[in-house]
Image (tube, rainbow, N blue to C red):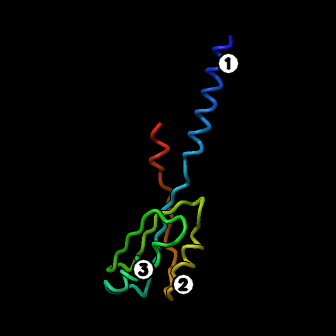
Amino acid sequence: MKTRRWIATCVVALLGVTAVLAKDIRAVVFKVAQMHCEKCEKKVKDNMRFEKGLKDLSTEVKTKTVTITYDADKTNVKNLQAGFKKFNYEAEFVKETKKDDKKADKK
C-alpha cells in the first residue's frame, strides 16, 4: 500500500515539474516603416536584443517586418512595441502566434 502511495506521489510531482517547464512562448510580427536598409535593420537588431523576455528576432527589409519570439511570462506585445520607441522607431502590430516550447516536450 505504501508503494502505491509513493508512486502516486511521484507521478503528481512529475506532472507538476512538467507544468513548470511549459513556458508561454509566442511570436509577434511588427511592421516597421523606418526599416528600409541594412543599417536600419542592424539598428533594430542592436537595440531590441536587450528587451526582457526576447528569445529570437528576425528581420525582413523588403517587407519591413520584424518577427520577435518572446516569453509571454516575462513581457508582452505592448512592452516590445515600447522597445522600438526607445530608438525612435514605430512598430505596428501585425499578428501574434503561440509557439510550442521544446523544453516542455522533452520529458
Q: Quadrant of the N terminus?
A: top right
Density class for disc 2 (Cα within 10 Å; few <14, some 14-19, many ≥20) is few
Q: What kind of element bears circle 2?
A: helix
Residue 75 placement (x, y as % from top left): 59, 66
Label 3 to label 2, Cα distance in Å?
Answer: 11 Å
Crowd rating for badge 1 (residues with CA inside 10 Å; few <14, some 14–19, many 20+): few
Question: What kind of residue is marked 2?
Answer: Lys
- Disc 2 to disc 1, how far (Cα)? 56 Å
- Residue, disc 1: 5
Q: CA distance from mark 3 to mark 1?
A: 55 Å
For the point 44% across and 82% down, which residue is it?
Answer: 32
Q: Which residue is mark 2?
A: 85
Sequence-wise, which precedes: disc 2 or disc 1?
A: 1
Please tell me in which quadrant of the rendered image residue 76 appears: bottom right
Nearest to N terminus: mark 3 or mark 2: 3
Q: Name the residue rendered at 47%, 46% in the picture.
A: 103
- Given residues 102 and 91, the one toward you in this image is 102
Secondary element under disc 3, as helix, strand or loop, is helix
Secondary-structure class at tag 1: helix
Residue 30 at x, y percent in the picture: 47, 75
Mark 3, other Cα within 10 Å: few <14 / some 14–19 / many ≥20: many
In the rendering, which numbered label is found on residue 44?
3
* Residue appearing at x 62%, y 32% in the figure: 13
Residue at the farthest top position: 1
- Is 64 left or right of 74, judged from the image as shown? left
Tally of numbered tags: 3
The residue depicted at 46 percent of the width and 70 percent of the height is 29
